[in-house]
Amino acid sequence: MDEIVNLDKTYILPFYSRFGVGFYKGKGAYLYGYDGRKYLDFTSGIGVLNFGHSHPAITREIKKQASKLVTTSNLFYSEERVKLAKKIIDITFDGGVFLSNSGAEANEAAIKIARFFGKTISKDKYKILSLTGSFHGRTLATITATGQKKYQKNLEPLPEGFDYVEYNNVEDLERKVDENVCAIFLEAIQGEGGIRPLSDEFVAKVKELKKKYNFLIVFDEVQTGVGRTGKYFGYMNFDIEPDMVTLAKAIGGGLPVGATVLRREYFNVCEPGMHASTMGGNQLASAVALKVLELLSDDILKHVNKMGELIMNELETLKSKYDFIKEIRGKGLMIGVDLDSRVEVIGVVKKLMGRGILTLRAGENVLRLLPPFVITEKEIDIFIRNLTEVFSSM
Ligand SMILES: Cc1ncc(COP(=O)(O)O)c(C=O)c1O
């Protein structure tokens, strides 16, 4: 482990501060560390391994496709690519898909498509709205769409034509929307922002204003998609039909995959040459992503909801015991425990790690839980028992 740490510090650019552990193997809800310990994983690679580590069907598909054909570029037709695109459309809405390799890329494509759409109406219709506390990626455009100043430090000048609506503030939304807005980006539940769900009232106002100002409603489902919130996609928790949806993380089953889904009526804004990605939609990634989506079923979602409710109920009980817990939020297996300033969330994450349980932080001071869908009642029990002991020691 010491050698790995030294090599990391020497040869990896210091953009990350890491915890002092690393893993050589994963199986289901567990990771196996270089330190010889077994860890219960409530992070799923930050919402990536929804079906757990080394899922047999996904591993089999990776091996099968890798030994057949990995990539041929987008210059040629591919059965794997069209099958994946059709499957995505079957479970979202009628339209088409642009395939890429990450969430940032999926959102970058969505920003460009929104601008293309705006230009079909007027040269000034290019403004992109997003919400405060949102997170949409780390490219220059997606970090500009990200409504959190801390990520934009020292990057100025940022691209023009972006503005931010205060999260769930209907009056601010009304103030910021005008005829020059080409799109609004939303997360059904803000992930990095601290597990903050959209309100029904806010979503209803977005729908109402779209009728008047004709902009695209874009749901960034990079973290909320692929069953995470107990529905196939996060937007399905609301009474709304998006014009665009962006996917990444879990759809690749651990491989880098991004997807931008656009409703069919907007096909005309996309023309050959306007956007591209060398690796996007490659055969290996596409075959594996298709397998991931085939694994997603009503039965799996039932389990996600059942396990999610179990965790939320247990957390509510803890909330009644510990007054430093401000709120329990989330849906399905995307859950946040909002703590007040008396308890630092990083301390909780570290203490749980010391007990062999991996969790995440988000937002200001929120403990974020993204366990894999293979999680069982027994493992939830282990988690709650340890969290209770950690909280009682704080
Ligand atoms: C909602 C959301 N959008 C976009 C991204 C960026 O995805 P990626 O890291 O794959 O570029 C993230 C990453 O956390 C995310 O949570």
Image (cartoon, helix red, strand yellow):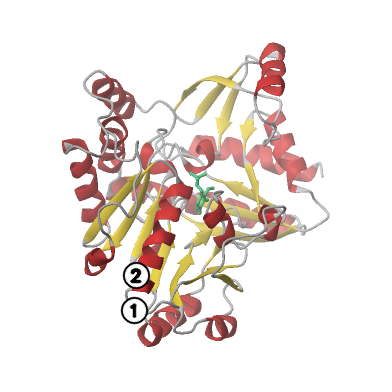
Q: Which mark is residue 121?
A: 1
Identify the element where label 2 is drawn: helix
- When the figure is inspected, residue 378 is found, relative to residue 365, above or below; the finding is above
- When the figure is inspected, residue 41 is found, relative to residue 235, above or below; the finding is above
Crowd around label 1: few <14 · some 14–19 · many ≥20 (10 Å): some
The quadrant of the rendering that contains the C terminus is top right
**Residue 234 picture location, percent across and down:** 41, 59
Q: Is residue 162 visible?
A: yes
Q: Is residue 229 visible?
A: no
Q: Is residue 228 left or right of residue 6?
A: left
Compare residues 36 and 379 and report the one nearer the observer.
36
**Residue 132 picture location, percent across and down:** 61, 67
Alpha carbon distance from label 2 to label 1:
7 Å
* Residue type of the residue flagged with mark 1: Ile
State if disc 1 and disc 2 touch (CB < 8 Å): yes
Crowd around label 2: few <14 · some 14–19 · many ≥20 (10 Å): many
